[in-house]
Amino acid sequence: MPYVKRIVCLANSYKPPNGRCIAGREVLASGCGAWIRPVSARETTEVSLSELRFENNTSPRLLDIIDIPLLKPDPRHHQTENHVIDSGRWVKVGEFPWEGLERLRDCPASLWINSDSTSAGVYDRISQTEAATVSDSLVLIRPEQFYVEVGRNYWTGRKSFRGAFTYNGTHYSLSVTDPVVRDVFGLKEEDRYPLNNVYICVSLTEPHEHDDKCHKLVAAIISQRPLK
């Protein structure tokens, strides 16, 4: 039986091959509930831009409150938050105040398991064996320090975007997949740019084809003021 979930959008992130990963906390009469990640029925699970558009042809933005028609839960290993989308239109019903994010903030001791790093990152991936011990894949945290690092990918020569931050005394450097952040900082020179007073949504991916590891990504950076 199809159903509708109302969520606060806390991530609208690039998802290969040609779509987005949307995620947020469910809105309930008693407050906010569990994390929800709407996914497509495709094996790669990304939601296409045409599938997530509102009736006025706009797309979800961070902190939008959205009604999303869904077909069934579809937990995949540590990504227990997945629900397959139905074909109906998504409906924006309001906006969540930035000041209310503290009520939604998660407080994990660490970002899952801190055991492995890519050549460009710090504690930005874990093995599939480690991921099998994890039962969630989305968190909203408030880092103690945060920088967007604009660099250059060694292999492709394209600009790269990483979020460098400290959380509970541990330093992380994770790839940023927030399209708004990549658009804004794509116009800037290669450098390190501090962002103060932000919340970030961190996502733990399914295994990547190139290394069979599950990667930690900064899926959204939520700032009180527009990024520039």
Image (tube, rainbow, N blue to C red):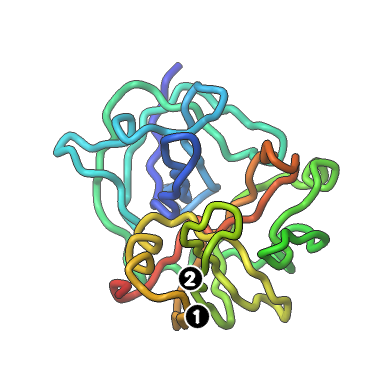
SS of the residue at dot 2? strand
User: Is the residue under label 1 in contact with that under label 2 (CB below 8 Å)?
Assistant: yes
Residue 52 against residue 202 in the figure, above or below = above
Residue 69 against residue 1 in the figure, above or below = below
Task: Point out residue 67 in the picture as x, y percentages from the top left corner.
Answer: 33, 38
Between 44 and 74, the one lying in front of the other is 44
Q: What residue lies at 42% left-to-right and 35% top-to-bottom?
A: 18
Q: How crowded is mark 2: few (under 14 residues within 10 Å), some or many (20 or more)?
A: many
SS of the residue at dot 1? strand
Question: Which label is found at residue 150?
Answer: 2
Between 30 and 88, the one lying in front of the other is 88
Residue type at mark 2? Val
Residue 123 against residue 70 in the figure, above or below = below
Q: What residue lies at 51% left-to-right and 22% top-to-bottom?
A: 42
Q: How crowded is mark 1: few (under 14 residues within 10 Å), some or many (20 or more)?
A: some
Relative to 23, 125 lies left or right: right
Residue type at mark 1? Arg
Q: What residue lies at 27% left-to-right and 29% top-to-bottom?
A: 89
Residue 161 against residue 219 in the figure, above or below = below
Question: Which label is found at residue 103?
Answer: none
Between 219 and 179, the one lying in front of the other is 179
**Observer able to see residue 31:** no
Task: Point out residue 59 in the picture as x, y percentages from the top left corner.
Answer: 27, 44
Q: Name the residue under label 1.
A: 192
**Observer able to see residue 73:** yes
Image quadrant containing the C terminus:
bottom left
Task: Point out residue 103 in the picture as x, y percentages from the top left corner.
Answer: 48, 67
